[in-house]
Amino acid sequence: MNTAVTPAVATPGSRRSWRAVLRTAAEPWLYLSPALIFIMLVMLVPLVIGISYAFQAISLMNPLESGWVGLANFEALYEDRKFWKSLKNTAYWTIASVFFQFFLGLGLALLLNHGFYGRRLVQALVFLPWAVPTFLSALTWAWLFNPVIGPLPHWLAAIGILSEPYNILSDPNIAIWGPIVANIWFGIPFFAITLLAALQSIPHDLYEAAAIDGASAWQGFIKITLPFLAPMIAITVMLRAIWVANFADLIFVMTGGGPANSTQIISTYIFTTAFRKLDFGYASAIAVVLLVLLLIYAAVLLRLRQSLRLVN
Amino acid sequence: MARIDIVDLCKRFGNIEVISNVNLSFEEGEFIVLVGPSGCGKSTLLRMIAGLESITKGDIIMNDQRVNDLPPRDRNIAMVFQSYALYPHMNVERNMGFSMEIKRTPPDTRRQHVDKAAAILGLGSLMERLPKALSGGQRQRVAMGRAIVRDPSAFLFDEPLSNLDAALRVEMRLEIARLHQRLGSTMVYVTHDQVEALTLADRIVVLDHGVVQQVGTPMELYESPANRFVARFIGSPTMNLIEVAMEDQQLTMKSTHSAIPLPALVGAESATQLGIRPEHLEPMPAGKGHVQGEVEVVERLGSDSFVYVQVPGAGRLLSRCNGNTRLQAGEAVGLSLDPAHLHLFDEKGQALR
C-alpha cells in the first residue's frame, strides 16, 4: 500500500527533501571540520609537499637549478649504489636487531614469569634502558666499543672474537654490529614487558592440566605457551620491525653511517642527504621509496593479523 | 584401578598447617568424596594426590608404590578442574586426545579412544568446536572426556560442578554417578556441597581445618556423626542444637533449668549440647511433647513444611513435617523429640554414645 502512495506525495516536495538530505549529510562533517582541517594542515599538507619534492630538484647547494624534474630523482636512485647498499643494510640491521631483541626478550620474560627472590628489583632494572635517552645510550655504547676507554674490545679480543682490541665501529666489515648490539640492549625491555604481560594472562591451571596429561615442561611450552603468545609475538615483531627500520638515532650518533657507508641505513641516508648535503629533492625521493616499502609491509602485516584473528 | 593410601600426611604453607596428620585408605573402585567448608584443605589434599602440590611430611601410596616424588604424569591419574582447564586454542577432539598427542600415539588409535569417550558423554557432534563455543555443561563433559581418554587408575575431581547452574548441576551429578558405575574406577571427588557428597559417595571424608573429622558412608555420617562439626555440616536443613545440662539425674535446658523429660541417655552426664535433626522433631498440640514453644514461621515447600518454633531456653528450633500442616505463625505448640535419634555432645563437641 505504501509503495502506491509514496511517489504521489514525494514528487512535489522532492527538491526540498533532497536539500534536507544534503543538509543532514553535511552536518556531521561540519562538526568534524576543525579536527579534519587541523589534521590536513599538520599531516596531509606536509605529506603532499614532501612527496612533491621527490619530483623536483631542490638542493640548497644548487639553488639555480630547481624545478620539476619528473622521475629524474628516482632514476638517479636506481643507479645509486649507496642507496642499494643502505637498503641492504636496513634489512640486515632490522632483521638482526629484531631477532635478538625478540629471543632475548622472550627469555627474559620467561625468567621474570617465575617467582624468585628479588624479582621486583630485577624487573625494574630490566626496564631501565627505556629510561635512558637514546642519544646518551648511543654515546655510551660508542665509548664502550672504544679500546682507549671501553672494556668491550679487550674482552672480545680475550675470548678470541677480535684478533686484537680495536674499535669495531671503524671496521667496515663488522661496524654495523656496534649499533645492532646497542639496539638489542635498547629493545629487549619492549619484548620482555609485552611478552611478560601475555605470559601472565595464561591461566595457570592449563599447565597443571597439561602436567597431568603427561606433558613435560618443554611440551607445555610448545603446546600451551607458544600458541597463547603467538598473536602477541606476531604483532610485536611486526611493529618492532617498522620502528627499528626507521630508527636512525643510534646509528647516527655512533657511526654517522660510516665507515665507508657500511652502517648507512635508509633513514640515516635520508637524514644525511637532506641535512648534510642539503639535497631535499633526492632525500624526498628516498623517503618516498621507504614510505612505499613500509606501506607494503604494513599491508602484509594487517592481512596477516586478520588471518590470525580468524584462526583464533 | 588404584588403591590409594595416605599415611601421616602433612602440608604446611610457611607456618600455616593446612593438612595435619591425615591417614586415609581408598579402596579400588571406591567413590570417595572429600567434603568440608572452604579453606578446610580438601582441594590441597586432592592436589597432593595429583602431584600438583608438594608433600611436607608423610606418604601417598598408590597400589603399594610410594608416589611422593613422582611427577603428576607418572601417577596415572586424571583430574577434572573446577575451571575445566580446557585448552582454549584446541578443538574438543584435540582437547580430549591431548594426553595421547603428548605420548605420540598414532592418530588412528587416538581417534578411536576419543570417539569412544565422546560416545559415552554424548559429545559426538561437538568434536570440531573450540571450548569458547561450548556451554558450561558441554565444557564440563569435555573435561571429563579428557580424563576418560587417559584411562587412568584414578579420577580426581576438584569441585567440578560449582561453576554450573543448579539444574545442570543435578544433571551432571547423575552423569558422574553413571560414569563411576560404568568405569568402576577409583574416584576422589572434592566438594563443599554436602548434597553432592551424600548422593555420590561410597564413603565421605569430612575435613575441617586440615583435620579429618570423620570417614564413613553417607548414612553413617548422617545417623551417627562423630562430632558437632559433622553433625552440623551433613544434612540439610542443619541439625538443631540445644544447650543442656544434667540436673538431678534429669536433662535440662541450661539457661532456663526447665527439664526435658527424656528417658535416661548414654553419656548424658557430660553432655553440654543436645542435637536433633528437624525430621525427628514432631509438632504436637500445645501442652504435649517434650518442650513447649510458639510457632514463628512456617515455610511450605510442597512435600515438606519447615516449622520454626521459638522455644524458651532452647532458642529457635526447626521441625520438618508434613507438607500440609495446619500450623500457623503465632500458635502455641509442643515438640516431641524422637528418643531414638538424639545426639549428645560434650563440651569439646565430641559425640557421646
Image: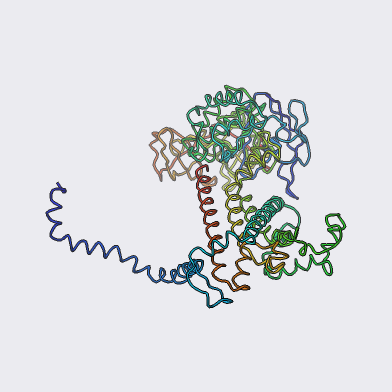
Q: Position of residue B162 (x, y in %)?
A: 54, 40
Which residue is pictured at 57% across the width and 59% down the height? A78
Q: Is residue B42 visible?
A: no
Is residue A190 depicted above or below A275 in this figure?
above
Q: Residue furthest front?
A: A65
In depth, the one of B273 and B180 nearer the eye is: B180
Q: Position of residue A259 (x, y in %)?
A: 73, 65
Which residue is pictured at 77% across the width and 34% down the height? B59
Q: Quadrant of residue A132?
A: bottom right
Is residue B284 depicted above or below A291 in this figure?
above
Q: Quadrant of residue A98?
A: bottom right
Count up the numbered dots: 0
Q: Position of residue B299 (x, y in %)?
A: 42, 41
In depth, the one of B241 and B75 nearer the eye is: B75
Is residue A306 depicted above or below B52 in this figure?
below
What colour-coding does the image apply?
A: rainbow
In depth, the one of B316 and A222 nearer the eye is: A222
Q: Is residue B47 toward the left or the right of residue A153 in the image?
A: left
Q: Quadrant of residue B52?
A: top right
Q: Is residue A168 visible?
A: yes
In depth, the one of B61 and A311 nearer the eye is: A311
Q: Position of residue B154 (x, y in %)?
A: 66, 28
